[in-house]
Image (cartoon, grey):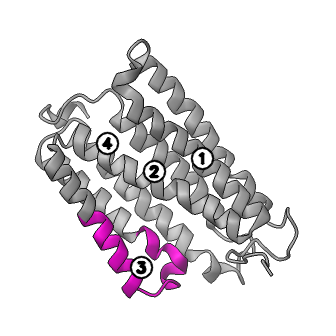
Amino acid sequence: MDNPIDLYCERTGTEFWSEPVNALTNLAFLVAAGLLLRVWLAAYRGRTAAGWDRLLLVILVAAIGLGSGLFHTFARTWAAMADVLPIALFISVFLLVSLKRLAGLGWPATLAWFAAYHGANVLAQRHLDPALLNGSVFYLPSFAALALLAAWLAWRGHVRSRRFTGAAVLFLVSLGFRSADMAVCAAWPLGTHFLWHLLNATLLWLLVCAVMDNPGPAQSARNG
C-alpha cells in the first residue's frame, strides 16, 4: 500500500492539503522560471541555438516547482520521483553549462569534473546516513561543487565569481533551514521547509541568471 510520505513538520495527516504552506511556496519556482524566461528572451531572441541549454535550465526550474508541489500535496512514492528527478536533472545540466560556458573548460575536462561530481554523489549516498541532516545529505556534493566552482571562478578573476560565491552562501543557509525542519517541530509546528523552497527559488534564479549571456572566463571580477 502506497501510504503518504510524512517527512516534514507541517504534515499532520494523510489529506491532499495537509502541507499547504510547503505546497504553495513552490509557486516561487514558477515565478523564478517566469522571470528567467524574460531574461532568456532578452539575451537570446533571434539566436535560440546559442541559448538552448540555458532555456533547458529555465524549463527545469519550472519542473522543480511543479514536482515539489505534487510531492507536498499527494506525498506518494510517484510524487517523490516527480520531485527528485527535475532537481537531479537541473544539477547535472547546470554543472555542464557552468563548466563549459563559464569555467571555459574543454569537453574532456568538463566531462572529467562531471564524472567526479557524480562519483562523489554516489559515495555520499552509499556511505552517509540518509537521515543525516534530515535528508539533506543528498545535496552536500552539490554544495561542494558550487563552492569549488565559485573558488575557481574567483581564482580566474571571472566577472561572475561574486555571484557564485553569494549563491554558495545562500545555498548553505537554505540547507540549514531544510535540515532544521523536523528538529523544530515541537517549538514551531509549521517547520522550516517552506523557507528552503523560497531560498532555493531565489538561488536557482541567481544561478541561471549568472550563466546567461556569458561574458567569458577572463574578464575582471571588478564588474561582477
* Residue in view at x 68 percent, y 52 percent: 25
Q: Is residue 132 magenta?
A: yes
**For the residue labelled by badge 3, is the local secondary structure a helix, a strand or a loop?**
helix
**Drawn side of residue 168 relative to residue 148, left or right:** right
Q: Earlier in the sequence, mark 1 or mark 3?
A: 1
Residue under numbered circle 3: 125
User: From this viewpoint, is residue 195 visible?
Assistant: no
* Residue in view at x 25 percent, y 52 percent: 150
**For the residue labelled by badge 1, is the local secondary structure a helix, a strand or a loop?**
helix
**For the residue labelled by badge 2, is the local secondary structure a helix, a strand or a loop?**
helix
Q: Earlier in the sequence, mark 4 or mark 2?
A: 2
In terms of image quadrants, where is residue 3?
A: bottom right
**Drawn side of residue 149 relative to residue 129, left or right:** left
Please, what is the three-letter code of the amino acid marked with disc 2?
A: Phe
Residue under numbered circle 2: 90
Pointers 1 and 4 in contact (CB under 8 A)? Answer: no
Question: Where is residue 157 shown, x and y percent of the image?
Answer: 13, 41
- Tell me the CA gap for discs 1 and 4: 18 Å
Q: Determine crowd level at label 2: few under 14, some 14-19, many 20+ residues with C-alpha closer than 10 A.
A: many
Q: Earlier in the sequence, mark 3 or mark 4?
A: 4
Q: Determine crowd level at label 1: few under 14, some 14-19, many 20+ residues with C-alpha closer than 10 A.
A: many
Is 209 in front, or is 78?
78
Q: Is residue 56 magenta?
A: no
Please, what is the three-letter code of the amino acid marked with disc 3?
A: Gln
Please state the extent of the stretch shown in magenta in the rendering.
116-139
Is 214 in front, or is 116?
116
Pointers 2 and 1 in contact (CB under 8 A)? Answer: yes
Please, what is the three-letter code of the amino acid marked with disc 1?
A: Ala
- Tell me the CA gap for discs 3 and 4: 24 Å
Q: Earlier in the sequence, mark 2 or mark 3?
A: 2
Please, what is the three-letter code of the amino acid marked with disc 4?
A: Val
